[in-house]
């Protein structure tokens, strides 16, 4: 018996009044794969992510996580926490500013109905695994550096042992000299566990390297999808070709 | 009207903060030939935007220019304590990252352009000014320019708004155009168009262009020369071809290593990809040590690096300099 | 706190407020009996025996003002506290749940704002008699809309923030979400507004007592002191001025202090030396 796909999206449609933000999007993500959804602003890629997470209700289509269909609205977030965890764009801002890291990580234990002490020990171990000292538990998010805060946010997500991690623009706004750090971390997590990665990004160069498969979105529709290394090298659709051609290249001012 | 040479010599700026006086920019010099397109590259904290704001006299109230001489358009003045606001608008124009910063949401596009035209050609009547504005919009590749004049900024997309800002710069006929991250907030497909537009502007009116950006790709594609900044200092400058291919300063080299290119070689599998980083962190400017600014993070540092290097020619070339003892 | 003291206004405000609070707390202990009548000494100016002089019945003004301050401050603080808590709850509920609940709350706030409060006060006095204690809740009503509206807009803007979405995705229950993550981020500005409302509350109480509806003689409150002095203004302007000066001091002081606190909290204004 084969394992169900980690994520299955069929004819997903999301409308905001008259505007169709996502128009019959369909794709499948096999377990342990890294799937990229790439596109420019307004392409609908972020809306797709939010619909998969349940932060956005959808008007038509189906979303399945590990073989379980998800409702179009009114999701049970608690039940979902061990299935899928988000990493928001600028993860540092996804940490509640007036609570200490330790308190934020303890919330994981509350949700999982785990004894507080057991959760605390797991939290410290997780922080350690991500290169953060035990003292970080007592700090407020603003007291950590940008990189540390990002790692603390990832620590919270990982504490749920999720099957899927959904990352929204993981490299946006990061300096070139630090984005590698974050990407390497994602790669390590990917290598060390059975996690499936869903990444939303406008950064074609990075997606070409790390994604197994990609879907290219334009104005709410998926215009092309397939293996990342072929779609982002020799695209077939006009839009994807134009997008790739416009991507700044270091060498050669033609 | 041709551009003018720009000579910025030894600009140093301190910031007054609750924690003390911070030397945010230290001895930055820029020399641009008339009509040159120069990139000013750096990451967060490099001070690149601060340099541009200093030239325009737009620094924050807690900034103090402690040194620097600006020679431009036949005038030369000390920047410390000087009033540079007179140069703004007439000879220097600036394009910001966020066009909303330049476009007042309660004025129509036509009003914005009209303002510039009126300053340039005070004798023109209303109809004539409108014609000039329409031509300017057409010159930057704006579709249906007559209609745009009556639209509001929020009705235009980001790329279109930047075109309007460029049109305003075109009308001002500056000798120097400073573009601070002009395309960072725009989609890639629009980015190329806007950059082409800026280059076209340079071709039309012959102004010099200072492109401030964190994107090495943009610099490589559009600039003739580049200055690299790190933590408030210049670390390398020279022709783009020389700096990008045979970069002398270790920071520039690491920056290029970290840059992810669309055509770069692939690892065996996506799972196996790893990315270069620059280890360490930016130095604390409150507690600057003597010695090279990049030394704590540099893998090529030697004992001599504890003395601050000067900008030295690379391989004997007079136009390629690096602030490094170890560079060739 | 250090930010507040950095501002000139903050320093001055803090000094004024501390001075007045000290008077309220310690004054009555060291002063003489505020109700002791001493006709021969009436309308005296400030002197060694009577630091702030005496009123029409020869009662020591310093003592009376200190007691008056106590009543005024306690009443004002209670009123503002009740208003803040009520406004916070209503505003957060309105801002978070939106739509119908929000619409209802906005209408509620508008009704309260438009309401002729003094009519209600007269009605209550007619039904239950005078006395400031009966009027505290009604006075709080005056201030609820401003807190409510502020809490509502703060909540609305927080709702879209990514840390709130992150917490929602944890499956955390709504009351817990509001208590742990919304309220701590709203309370700061609310407290500043509360500080700025205290002088207004004192003035309201003074007005009510001035009209004879609140505190009854011989108990002193700033309002009654001003009124008592007002009646005898021809004979001596001093009692009125003394009480009014203290009222001004506390009003100015808390406004300066609250404004400095607001500037200190607002990160955009920080770092401007």
Image: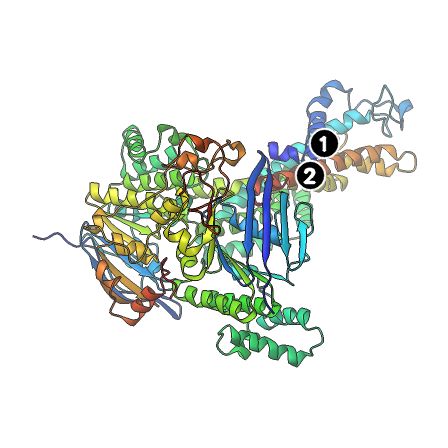
Location of mark 1 (residue) = C16
Q: Is residue A82 left or right of residue B317?
A: left
Quadrant (top left, top right, bottom left, bottom right) of the N terminus of chain B? bottom right
Number of callouts? 2
Tell me if label 1 and label 2 are in contact, CB under 8 Å.
yes
Nearer to the camera, A215 or A19:
A215
Q: Is residue B220 left or right of residue C113?
A: left
Nearer to the camera, B123 or C92:
B123
Q: Does residue B101 sit above or below B23 in this rendering? A: below
Q: Does residue A62 sit above or below B260 in this rendering? A: below
Location of mark 2 (residue) = C256
Quadrant (top left, top right, bottom left, bottom right) of the C terminus of chain B? top left
For mark 2, name the chain. C
Q: Residue at x 56, y 49 (%)?
A: B51
Nearer to the camera, B121 or A38:
B121
Specify whether residue C209 is in view: yes
Residue C9 x/y as whole percent: 70, 37
Residue C39 x/y as whole percent: 89, 24
Q: Quadrant of residue A71?
A: bottom left
Q: Look at the numbered disc 2 and give the secondary structure of its residue.
A: helix
Q: Is residue C241 left or right of residue B148?
A: right
Q: Quadrant of residue A99?
A: top left
Q: Residue at x 51, y 72 (%)?
A: B140
Specify whether residue A57 is in view: no
Tell me if mark 2 has few (under 14), some (14-19) or many (20+) residues whose alpha carbon lies within 10 angstroms of its own: many
């Amino acid at each position: 018996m084969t394992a169900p796909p980690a994520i299955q999206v069929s004819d997903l449609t999301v409308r905001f009044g008259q505007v169709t933000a996502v128009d019959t999007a369909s794709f499948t993500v096999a377990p342990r794969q890294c799937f990229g959804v790439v596109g420019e602003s307004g392409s609908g890629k972020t809306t797709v992510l939010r619909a998969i997470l349940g932060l956005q209700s959808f008007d038509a289509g189906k979303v399945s996580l590990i073989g379980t269909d998800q409702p179009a609205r009114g999701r049970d977030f608690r039940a979902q926490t061990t299935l899928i965890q988000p990493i928001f764009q600028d993860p540092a801002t996804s940490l509640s500013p007036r609570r200490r890291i330790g308190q934020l990580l303890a919330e994981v234990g509350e949700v999982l109905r785990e004894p507080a002490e057991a959760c605390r020990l797991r939290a410290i171990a997780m922080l350690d695994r991500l290169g953060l000292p035990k003292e970080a538990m007592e700090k407020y998010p603003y007291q950590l550096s940008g990189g540390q805060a990002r790692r603390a946010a990832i620590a919270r997500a990982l504490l749920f042992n999720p099957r899927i991690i959904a990352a929204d623009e993981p490299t946006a706004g990061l300096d070139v000299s630090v984005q590698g750090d974050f990407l390497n971390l994602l790669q390590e997590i990917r290598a060390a566990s059975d996690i499936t990665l869903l990444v939303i990004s406008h950064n074609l160069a990075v997606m070409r390297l790390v994604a197994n498969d990609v879907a290219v979105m334009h104005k709410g529709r998926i215009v092309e999808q397939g293996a990342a290394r072929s779609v982002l090298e020799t695209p077939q659709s006009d839009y994807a070709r134009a997008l790739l051609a416009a991507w700044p290249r270091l060498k050669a001012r033609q | 009207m041709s551009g003018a040479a720009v000579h910025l010599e030894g600009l140093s700026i301190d910031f007054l903060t609750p924690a003390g006086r911070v030397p945010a920019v230290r001895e930055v010099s820029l020399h641009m030939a008339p009509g040159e397109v120069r990139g000013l590259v750096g990451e967060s904290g490099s001070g690149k935007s601060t340099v541009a704001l200093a030239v325009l006299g737009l620094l924050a109230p807690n900034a103090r220019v402690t040194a620097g001489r600006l020679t431009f358009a036949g005038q030369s003045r000390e920047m410390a304590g000087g009033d540079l606001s007179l140069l703004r608008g007439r000879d220097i124009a600036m394009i910001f990252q966020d066009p909303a910063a330049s476009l007042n949401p309660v004025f129509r596009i036509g009003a914005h352009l009209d303002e510039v035209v009126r300053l340039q050609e005070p004798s023109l009547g209303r109809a004539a000014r409108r014609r000039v504005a329409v031509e300017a919009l057409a010159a930057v590749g704006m579709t249906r320019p007559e209609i745009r004049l009556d639209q509001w900024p929020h009705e235009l997309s980001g790329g279109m708004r930047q075109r309007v800002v460029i049109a305003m710069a075109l009308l001002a006929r500056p000798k120097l155009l400073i573009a601070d991250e002009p395309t960072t907030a725009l989609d890639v497909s629009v980015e190329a168009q806007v950059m082409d537009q800026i280059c076209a502007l340079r071709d039309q009116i012959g102004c010099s262009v200072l492109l401030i950006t964190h994107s090495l790709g943009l610099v490589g594609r559009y600039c003739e020369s580049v200055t690299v900044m790190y933590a408030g200092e210049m670390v390398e400058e020279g022709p783009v071809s020389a700096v990008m291919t045979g970069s002398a300063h270790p920071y520039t080299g690491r920056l290029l290593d970290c840059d992810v290119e669309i055509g770069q070689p692939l690892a065996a599998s996506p799972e196996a990809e790893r990315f270069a980083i620059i280890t360490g962190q930016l130095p604390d400017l409150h507690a600057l040590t003597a010695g090279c600014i990049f030394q704590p993070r540099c893998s090529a540092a030697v004992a001599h690096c504890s003395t601050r290097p000067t900008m030295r020619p690379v391989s004997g070339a007079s136009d390629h300099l690096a602030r490094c003892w170890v560079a060739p | 706190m250090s930010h507040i003291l950095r501002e000139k206004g903050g320093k001055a405000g803090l000094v004024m407020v501390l001075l007045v609070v000290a008077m309220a707390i310690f004054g009555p202990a060291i002063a003489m009996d505020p109700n002791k009548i001493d006709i021969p000494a009436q309308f005296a100016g400030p002197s060694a025996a009577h630091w702030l002089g005496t009123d029409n019945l020869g009662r020591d003004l310093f003592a009376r003002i200190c007691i008056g301050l106590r009543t005024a401050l306690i009443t004002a603080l209670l009123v503002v506290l009740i208003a803040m808590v009520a406004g916070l709850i209503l505003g957060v509920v309105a801002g978070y749940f939106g739509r119908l609940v929000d619409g209802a709350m906005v209408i509620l706030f508008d009704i309260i704002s438009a309401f002729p409060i003094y009519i209600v006060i007269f009605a209550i006095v007619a039904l239950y008699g005078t006395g400031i204690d009966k009027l505290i809740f009604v006075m709080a009503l005056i201030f609820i809309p401003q807190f409510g509206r502020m809490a509502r807009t703060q909540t609305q803007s927080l709702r879209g923030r990514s840390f709130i979405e992150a917490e929602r995705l944890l499956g955390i229950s709504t009351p817990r979400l509001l208590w742990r993550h919304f309220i701590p981020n709203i309370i700061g500005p609310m407290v500043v507004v509360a500080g700025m409302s205290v002088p207004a509350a004192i003035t309201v109480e003074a007005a009510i007592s001035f009209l004879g509806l609140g505190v009854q003689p011989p108990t002193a409150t700033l309002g009654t002191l001003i009124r008592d002095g007002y009646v005898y203004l021809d004979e001596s302007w001093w009692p009125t001025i003394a009480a009014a000066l203290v009222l001004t001091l506390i009003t100015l002081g808390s406004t300066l202090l609250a404004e400095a606190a607001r500037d200190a909290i607002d990160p955009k204004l920080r770092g401007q030396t």
